[in-house]
Image (tube, coloured by chain):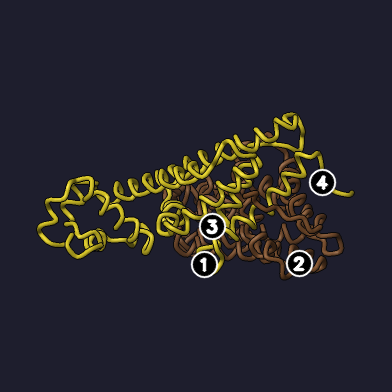
Chain colours: A brown, B yellow
Amino acid sequence: MTEDVKTPRSRRLPRAVRERQILDAAVEVFSRHGYHSASMDEISEVAGVSKPMIYSYLGAKEDLFAKCIRREAGRLLEAVRDGLRSELPPDMQLWHGLRSFYRFVAEYRDSWTVLHRQALTVGGRFADEITMLRSRAIEVVTALVVTAGMKKGLGDRAEFSGPALAVALVGAAESLADWWLDHSEVSDGVLASWLMNLVWLGFNDLIEGSVWRPEE
Amino acid sequence: MTEDVKTPRSRRLPRAVRERQILDAAVEVFSRHGYHSASMDEISEVAGVSKPMIYSYLGAKEDLFAKCIRREAGRLLEAVRDGLRSELPPDMQLWHGLRSFYRFVAEYRDSWTVLHRQALTVGGRFADEITMLRSRAIEVVTALVVTAGMKKGLGDRAEFSGPALAVALVGAAESLADWWLDHSEVSDGVLASWLMNLVWLGFNDLIEGSVWRPEE
């Protein structure tokens, strides 16, 4: 926030710019305090926008939080989708997708905190939004895994389930992103590479026909 | 709940038995409605124990929920630990740990729902309990992964991080358990086998010295 947005002159800014300022401030404040403890006063102060204007443009706290989640979820999906390159082999697609995901988390740490930690802990309609976001992410990964599996004729193998593998992979990626919030000394490239080594070498063996079975 | 616990004679039951009845009922009701919508009236009815007695034995709703989480978290950890057999090779240990985890989720579906879905959505001190539970699970898996890695002399390899792999694996296992709540046609053995195929064949390649690297 630059100083001049707090002066009376800033009242002349277009509505879209205002709304962006408010959402940016709200994501920052919700990330810091969580939904319940965050105050509209602080959001107003950080945004340099009066409370009545916030209510008029984006609604009360619940609406504002919902709009934050929707915007950040959209950004995250867009970032990951932009990272995928359908012309590459599936492992490279997954690698680029993971890189994009972790780059997003690094760059928009507040967004990720609001999406992953805050939205779930508030529950209700917000948790539903996150469930939708996860479903989309799982769809993207499933498409990738199933395409790769189908090429190798694995559609009917009992030890192969595209959707389940995608669910596991998305869970692993999220879990690692959460861990990363407290281990920021690790670079996003190293993080993505750890996960890639874990899951892809596994998957690669699967599509080459290896099967792990318990020794009874 | 059997009929006789609702009769006056049931007042003579020992306190420990009462507390177990109350906790069983509370887990069932919290799982069904979530923390905020669950009512002490319904818990009292399901338990066949009067509300004043619930308050006197286990406290108000918040305390009751905390005690549910603590009991179920302890049960889950115990079930997984019982499943591990330290004399077996690490892949078999992990296999048995996963089997125990999914068996627990199958048998105590309400417990898992309360632990994984409800506790997080309520947030605050409850989310902290879950964070502690996850940390314990991650410690168990890290010990297993690091031991296996150390034997192969992987301690210093950049692409190998025991704690990060454990975090990813626990996230994958949780995510799949959550997916399973809506796909109960899959058996617990098949579920554990999918995850084992995904993560172990990957890890197995890692400890044999294979490394996946992006082709630039």
Which tag is nearer the camera, tag 4 or tag 2? 2
Most foreground residue, B40 or A166: A166
For mark 3, give the secondary structure: helix
Classify mark 4: helix, strand or loop.
Answer: loop
Element at label 1: loop
Q: Which mark is residue A11?
A: none
Q: Chain of mark 4?
A: B
Question: Mark 4 sits on what residue?
Answer: B212
Q: Chain of mark 2?
A: A
Res. B209 visible in picture: yes
The amino acid type, in three-letter code, at marker 3 is Ala
Foreground disc of the pair 3, 2: 2
| Residue A38 place in picture, x, y as percent | 45, 49
- Are discs 3 and 1 located on one and the same chain? yes
Determine whether, in the image, residue B188 is placed left or right of residue B130. right
Question: For residue B86, which quarter of the picture?
Answer: top right
- Give the x, y percent position of residue A204: 79, 54
The numbered disc on residue A154 is 2
Instruction: Give, as a three-letter code, the residue at label 4.
Output: Trp
Question: Which residue is at a point 65% across and 33% down the rendered structure image?
Answer: B147
The disc labelled 2 sits on which kind of residue?
A: Leu
In the foreground, A128 or A68: A128
- Comparing marks 4 and 1, which lies closer to the viewer? 1
Q: Callout 2: few (<14), some (14-19), or many (20+) C-alpha neighbours within 10 Å?
A: many
- Circle 1: is it few (<14), some (14-19), or many (20+) Cα within 10 Å? few
Between residues A159 and B125, which one lies in front from this camera angle?
A159
Closer-to-camera residue (A183/A39): A183
**Disc 3 to disc 1, how far (Cα)?**
10 Å
* Label 3 in the same subunit as label 4: yes
N-terminal of the pair, mark 3 or mark 1, is: 3
Res. A13 visible in picture: no
Q: Which residue is mark 1?
A: B184
